[in-house]
Amino acid sequence: MQIIKNIEALQALVGQEVGTSDWVLIDQKRVNLFADATDDHQWIHVDTERAERESPFGEPVAHGFLTLSLLPRLTSDIMEIRGVTTTVNYGLDKVRFVAAVAVGSRVRARQTLKSVEPRGEGRYMLHNTVTIEIEDNDKPACIAESLSLIIF
């Protein structure tokens, strides 16, 4: 994890890759819990036998939105900005699901800081490109343009 001491040190990182997270396992239990939480029980995610027989992927795969929902968990491994009292998820500018995440795979995030914009006293909008990689796969699972408001 990279420790950022102040806003000036953060601004110096604009345009650079900030780092990568630890790997996180996407197991069937996580997929089933996500299906229950979202009422999305599509068989390609939760019916392992049918997915192996009929899915174009040949196995069950994670929901795209499950992968996307891991952004806060994954990016929290990458950097800590000292003095920040609150971080608010401000949304996404663009999201693309590039490759399916097979159940049993591990994913991690690679984060690049695109901009740091002042938004009033002690507030800054961070624009990051977050690529969620799949271990041993050339294609990423997801590429997201993420916005976060940090408050000192």
Image (cartoon, grey):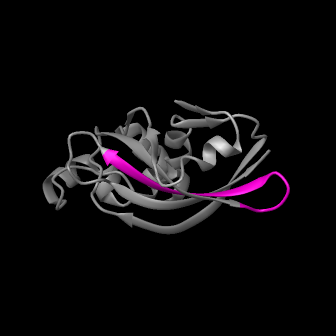
Rendered view: 122 above or below 29: below
Q: Is residue 83 visible?
A: yes
Question: What residue sits 54% from the left and 40% below the top?
Answer: 73
Q: Is residue 127 within the magenta segment?
A: yes
Which one is nearer the viewer's eye here, 140 or 123? 123
The percent coordinates of residue 76 (x first, y second) are 56, 38
Question: What residue sits 42% from the left and 51% below the top?
Answer: 67
Which one is nearer the viewer's eye here, 88 or 99? 88
Q: Is residue 40 visible?
A: no
Left or right: residue 33 versus residue 106 is right
Left or right: residue 90 versus residue 74 is right
Quarter where residue 63 is shown: bottom left
Rendered view: 109 above or below 92: above
The percent coordinates of residue 82 (x first, y second) are 71, 34
Quarter where residue 86 is shown: top right
Question: What residue sits 33% from the left and 47% below the top?
Answer: 133
Q: Residue furthest bottom?
A: 93
Question: What residue sits 20% from the left and 50% below the top?
Answer: 138
Q: Main secondary structure of the magenta part?
A: strand
* Magenta range: 118-133
